[in-house]
Amino acid sequence: MAKKIKAIGLLSGGLDSTLAARVLLNQGVDVKGVHFYTGFCIVGLKKVFAGQKDQPVRHEALRAGRDLGVEVDIVDISEDYLKMVTHPRHGYGSQMNPCIDCRIHMLREAKRRMELEGASFVFTGEVLGQRPMSQRRDVMNTIEREAGLRGYLLRPLSAKLLRPTIPEKEGWIDPDGLYDIQGRSRKRQIELAQKFGLTDFPQPAGGCCFLTDEHYAARFRDLLDHREAKVLTQEEVYLLAVGRHFRLSPAAKVIVGRNEKENLFLERYQDNCWAFQTVEHPGGLVLLFGPVNDELKKTAASIAARYSKDKDQSSILVKGDGPEGSERFNVRPLDDDKLDKMRI
């Protein structure tokens, strides 16, 4: 070769993308990783709220880059990504996951970086047939075409089962060093990891995208259904992962902290809404979002009473703080039957 070939790779830090990078490194390709922050990958948040605050939360893509000896750029695409998620051209998966549009969105950005850095092609760790929505042969072709990477998108783990790419045709890489892995089994990937001496990688668990989570997706769907313009903020999206959620009216909802860590997190947002907390009995912080009236405030106070330590009492004093000042409510804890009807 007249010059060393450079490739840009989508690096999540999972086993598949790590293996794809290793395959190309073994062929002498100059690999650079890119990891996109979407605003929906909230592994660190989950760990904190699971009571693991003292355990370090490592960034798997950076860890993989360190192990592979390659540079990894972390790119925040959350603003544009949020617009895409609310209006996906190719629709959603089993929950609120727009996997096809997600892939196209990331690969378009990867292509832009490829051109800026003078790289020759883009690669991913995708495996044919592994994911039902975005890794079917026809869909993979669609993604490649709509990302503007026709012929320049290499999937090293399944390349022998797919159309030859320009890197293969031009001899930039050796096609014999690529693989024919397909399906959902990870057996061959585990064998490859052992062959390459890769031992430190996260076990596959559906990724870190909250949009595939049933409970999170229900909250996300509820938020979209009650927002006429379907325009959301990053703060709203982030809050969907925290606490218990209840819909009080088409425009108003409540979030209840489940433990001390969530209460502390929710305190960051209480200046822009009504916040309720029991006065004499320990309980969760309750935030009421949206336009409110006296009836909604009383309901939110009753929810705060329901989630206090002494929820069996007939009357509990609750303090409410909002933009108009403070109020106190002597309320009966809300019945579970009524609460369940509001639960999102």
Image (tube, rainbow, N blue to C red):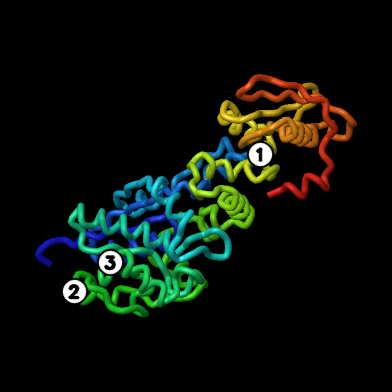
Amino acid on which disc 2 is placed = Gly
Q: Position of residue 220 (x, y in %)?
A: 57, 51
Q: Are there few (<14), some (14-19), or many (20+) residues within 10 Å of tag 2?
A: few
Between the residue at mark 2 and the residue at mark 1, the CA separation in whole angstroms equals: 57 Å
Residue type at mark 3 is Leu
Total numbered labels? 3
Check if mark 3's residue and mark 1's residue have beta carbons within 8 Å: no
Residue at image coords 28%, 54%: 32
Left or right, 156 with respect to 88, comes to: left
Residue occupying image coordinates x 62% and y 42%: 251
Is residue 95 something that shows in the picture? yes
Mark found first going from the N terminus, 3 or 1: 3
- Percent position (x, y) of residue 143? 37, 68
Residue at the spot of label 2: 171
The x, y position of residue 280, in whole percent, is: 80, 22
Height in image: 114 above or below 181? above
Q: Which mark is residue 149?
A: 3
Residue denoted by label 1: 255
The residue carrying pointer 1 sits among few (fewer than 14), some (14 to 19) or many (20 or more) residues within 10 Å by Cα, namely many
Q: Residue furthest left?
A: 2
Relative to 160, is 79 above or below? Answer: above
Label 1 SS: strand
Which quadrant of the figure has residue 244?
top right
Q: Nearer the viewer, mark 2 or mark 1?
A: 1
Q: CA distance from mark 3 to mark 2?
A: 18 Å
Q: Nearer the viewer, residue 94 or 175?
A: 94
Please determine whether, in this image, residue 203 is positioned above or below residue 292: below
* Earlier residue among tags 3 and 2: 3
Q: Left of 244 or right of it: where is 228?
A: left
Q: Alpha carbon of mark 3 to alpha carbon of mark 1: how far?
A: 43 Å
Mark 3–mark 2 CB contact (< 8 Å):
no
